[in-house]
Amino acid sequence: MEFLRPASWPEALSLKAEHPEAVPIAGGTDLMVELNFDKRRPPAILDLGRITELTEWSEVDGSVWLGAAVPYQRIITELADRLPGLAMASRTVGSPQIRNRGTVGGNLGSASPAGDAHPPLLAADAVVEVASVRGARTIPVSEFFLGVKRAALAEDELIRAVRQPVADGPQQFSKVGTRNAMVIAVCSFALALHPARGTVGTGIGSAAPTPRRAPEAEALLADELDWHQPQPLSEGLLIRFGELVAAAAAPIDDVRGSAAYRRHALAVLARRTLAWTWQDYRSGRWSRCA
């Protein structure tokens, strides 16, 4: 196995072009497990640990530019006010050690349907910045996942950053697992309210071949919610929203849960997160929802 360790972003892109089979590594929380259990033996590893710009973030024109190697713990401590849904999801990732190493860029690169960062990124309309020696481009997160652990990356491309609008309304993330920590989600759900444009964003995790949104559920709330004179939500609306979220999923039976249970749990998570975010919006304290 060849070990490549670029000192700069241009060098990393050049090495990836020369070695398209090279697997990038940043935190290593996914890749090292696969290597240690001999489930993967790539011919080359591309270590991005020396590229400092990937560990930085900035806020420009109402959006956060989040370097691909910013660890989850820094999202929790530095960005919970700007990206509350992503910060909530980050708190559920693994253990403190994993949160200090794992990254959103690595989560996206793995493209697992159960990735904890994926639902809040979907709900918040994030985009992924990728680059190669041929140039740079952006991919909406909703178009990034192509299948189970398959992403819309060319073989010579690397993930540089995620761009996500600063929250303009309440956000929530919730997941079901077999225990409270160190667990892969049985299913997960993220919700983001966007009052300025009167829309709602959703994100479903671990309940389909790819993370996905629930467009019919989003359309229902866009029609039903009164943003100017917010009233308590009816039980019927909460139930219908949960049903539409569950219907948008395509779960399977596996060792972590049955398809029927995943649909049921998603409906419950959808109702709860909607009730929480709407109450935060009505009370005017949504900026503290992180």
Image (cartoon, rainbow, N blue to C red):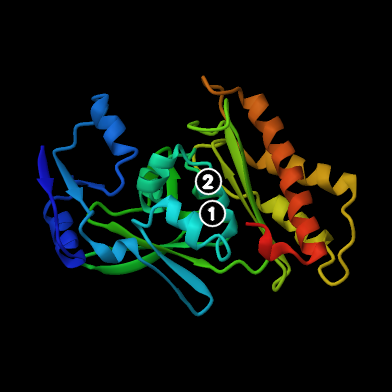
Please report the residue visible at 82 percent of the width from the left and 46 percent of the height from the top: 238
- Residue with the most extreme bottom position: 61
Q: From the top left corner, tell me how far across and down residue 122 is, in percent.
A: 55, 55
- Camera-nearest residue between 55 and 109: 55
198 in relation to 28, above or below: below
Local packing at callout 2 (Cα closer than 10 Å; few below 14, some 14-19, many 20+) is some
Judge from the rendering whether residue 231 lies leftward or rightward of residue 276; answer left or right: right
Judge from the rendering whether residue 117 lies leftward or rightward of residue 22; answer left or right: right
Instruction: Give the total of numbered labels.
Output: 2
149 in relation to 159, above or below: above
Local packing at callout 1 (Cα closer than 10 Å; few below 14, some 14-19, many 20+) is many
Residue 133 in view of the camera: no
Q: From the top left corner, tell me how far across and down residue 287 is, in percent.
A: 67, 65
How far apart are the alpha carbons under marks 1 and 2?
A: 6 Å
* Quarter of the rendering containing residue 199: bottom right
Q: Secondary structure at mark 2?
A: helix
Judge from the rendering whether residue 119 lies leftward or rightward of residue 148; answer left or right: right
Q: Are marks 1 and 2 in contact (CB under 8 Å)?
A: yes
36 in relation to 112, above or below: above
Tag 1: residue type? Ala
Quadrant location of the N terminus?
A: top left
The numbered dot on residue 50 is: none
Tag 2: residue type? Arg
Q: Please name the residue that numbered disc 2 is placed on.
A: 91
- Camera-nearest residue between 287 and 218: 287
Q: Please name the residue that numbered disc 1 is placed on.
A: 87
